[in-house]
Image: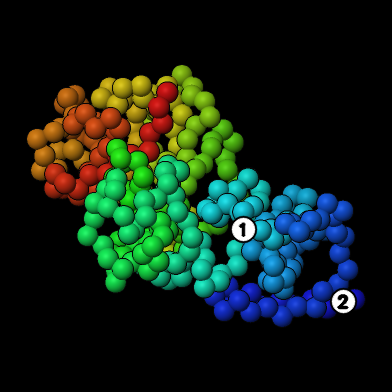
Amino acid sequence: MTMYSAAWEMKQHIFSVEKDKRIISNNNSSTNKIFYNHSVLRCAVDCVNDENCHAASHDKSVLTCHLSLSTSELSSYALETNIGWNFLRKVYKNTDCYLEESWNYNGNVNYTHSRRTCQMWNLQSPHTHSYTSEQISDFNSNYCRDPDAIGTPWCYTTDQNFWWEFCPVTKCDACQQVENIPNGLTVKYNMSYGYLVALYSCKSLTADESTGHCPSSFCQSNGTWSDFSMSCGVDDCYNNSSTYRGKVSCSALGNVCKVWDTVNTHDHPSDPADHVTNYCRDPKGEGRPYCYKGTEDHEWEYCHVTKC
């Protein structure tokens, strides 16, 4: 029997492995390789041992390993992969994830979560700013950066109507994509202010009443996702945010909402019955339901509620 051992150390990029025979796809090219009968670990090992490999994705349902040999094939956001795939990325000096702190990021992502192109840092149009080459690495580029260490790389956009936005860049050792999505639900991911969040939505709604729930799951410091809860009743979406009657009780970042009566604000929900609840509402007319994570008027965050 061939003995197989491997040591995975992402930050140091260290591997030791004794490989045995494997089945290789006839569809291999200069931009990708496909292997069959591969484990997740074997897939990662083969990528690290191939100097031309930039990333490896593994389909555990059919034990297939795909090595990407061209950065043009890669998704810049490791969590935006098909259900059932584990995505592993090599870490180089210039990488599309960051080690430890977001201000360390020096990769090449140059667009935002909404797919807007980043403005060049050395330009003052369409948006003016005060950053200099001493504050921004690659000042003559439009790569996402975090010069003020706010927790997530960002950039000004080339859209004159959209000032700035966070970029789809996460920590290299952040939570992996959710593998077992409950039936009837979908999930998407968001990264802002250093928080990686999985946002759940219902594929369809029933005639049932809404129940109190928190559809936001955040990536915890131990690399696992926090608990979430769902309701898929008739009121669990909105056409007009000011008339939303569902019962989401946490912000999109997973913070538990404060009871409306405990918040120092003049903008309380129009229905007095809501004042003793912590359900997301939109009394200010923000266009999306929101709630307060603290007791002061400025301490509010949007909630994850889908449009009907």
From the viewer's perspective, is 115 left or right of 255?
Answer: right
Q: Looking at the picture, how far across and down is residue 18, in whole percent? A: 80, 78
Sequence-first disc among 1 and 2? 2
Q: Residue at x 44, y 32 (%)?
A: 231
Q: Residue at x 78, y 61 (%)?
A: 38
Q: Amino acid at mark 1?
A: Thr
Q: Looking at the picture, how far across and down is residue 86, in whole percent? A: 64, 55
Image quadrant in which you'd find residue 20: bottom right
Image quadrant in which you'd find residue 72: bottom right
Residue farthest top in this picture: 207
- Disc 1 is placed on an element classified as helix
CA separation, marks 1 and 2? 33 Å
Q: Nearer the viewer, residue 5 or 115?
A: 115
Q: Is residue 101 above or below residue 229?
A: below
Q: Is residue 284 visible?
A: yes
Q: Which residue corresponds to mark 1?
A: 71
Q: Which residue corresponds to mark 2?
A: 2
Q: Looking at the picture, how far across and down is residue 71, in whole percent? A: 61, 58
